[in-house]
């Protein structure tokens, strides 16, 4: 069903301040910094040997990530699992009672993703991610 952890996402108030820790102190390189308008976030990806750390900063005060930050503060937001076939994986998870948050959609890079509600995944927001090509 899953092939690997793609990334672990950490919500931050300010990506530049977070990079002062993750890049400058810890020494992780920045692969890219981008915005995802549909999610109203700015993201920085820092690769490791076994996946990436994604720093996410809300761009609006009413986005889901902004509400998460206001309620819980900075910290772990979700774990993203790369899957070979997102539609089949979603169907399989749904038959086992996991709550899928909407339908799979495409990000700015053209990859498919969808989230699994934390109430059905033991308190952790999961993201499923299918790379194209």
Image (tube, grey):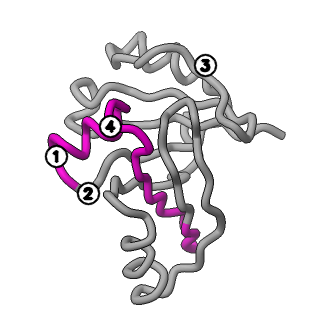
x, y percent for residue 27 = 49, 87
Q: Residue at horizontal 32%, vertical 58%?
A: 13
The disc placed on residue 72 is 1
Image quarter in which the C terminus is found: top right
Rounded to the nearest angstrom, the CA distance separating label 4 from label 2 is 17 Å
Q: Secondary structure at mark 1?
A: helix
On screen, residue 97 versus residue 72, left or right, reads right
Rounded to the nearest angstrom, the CA distance separating label 4 from label 3 is 34 Å
Q: Quadrant of residue 118?
A: top left
> Could you tell which of marks 4 and 3 lies nearer the N-terminus?
4
On screen, residue 47 versus residue 119, left or right, reads right
In this rendering, the answer to whether 96 lies above or below 48 is above
Q: Secondary structure at mark 4?
A: loop
Magenta span of residues: 46-73
Q: Residue at horizontal 16%, vertical 46%?
A: 72
Near-viewer residue (16 or 75): 16
Image quarter in which the N terminus is found: top right
Rounded to the nearest angstrom, the CA distance separating label 2 from label 3 is 31 Å
Pointers 2 and 1 in contact (CB under 8 A)?
A: yes
Pointers 4 and 3 in contact (CB under 8 A)?
A: no
The disc placed on residue 11 is none
* Nearer to us: label 1 or label 4: 4
In this rendering, the answer to whether 47 lies above or below 62 is below
Q: Secondary structure at mark 2?
A: strand
Residue at the disc numbered 3: 88
Residue at the disc numbered 2: 75
């Amino acid at each position: 069903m899953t092939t690997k952890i793609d990334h672990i996402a950490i919500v931050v108030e300010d990506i530049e301040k977070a990079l002062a820790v993750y890049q400058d102190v810890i020494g992780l390189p920045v692969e890219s910094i981008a915005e995802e308008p549909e999610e109203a976030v700015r993201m920085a990806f820092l690769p490791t040997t076994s996946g990436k750390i994604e720093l996410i900063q809300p761009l609006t005060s009413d986005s889901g990530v902004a509400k998460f930050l206001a309620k819980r503060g900075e910290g772990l937001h979700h774990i993203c699992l790369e899957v070979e076939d997102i539609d089949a994986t979603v169907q399989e998870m749904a038959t086992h009672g996991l709550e899928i948050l909407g339908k799979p959609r495409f990000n700015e890079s053209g990859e498919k993703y969808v989230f699994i509600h934390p109430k059905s995944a033991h308190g952790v927001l999961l993201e499923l991610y299918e790379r194209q090509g």
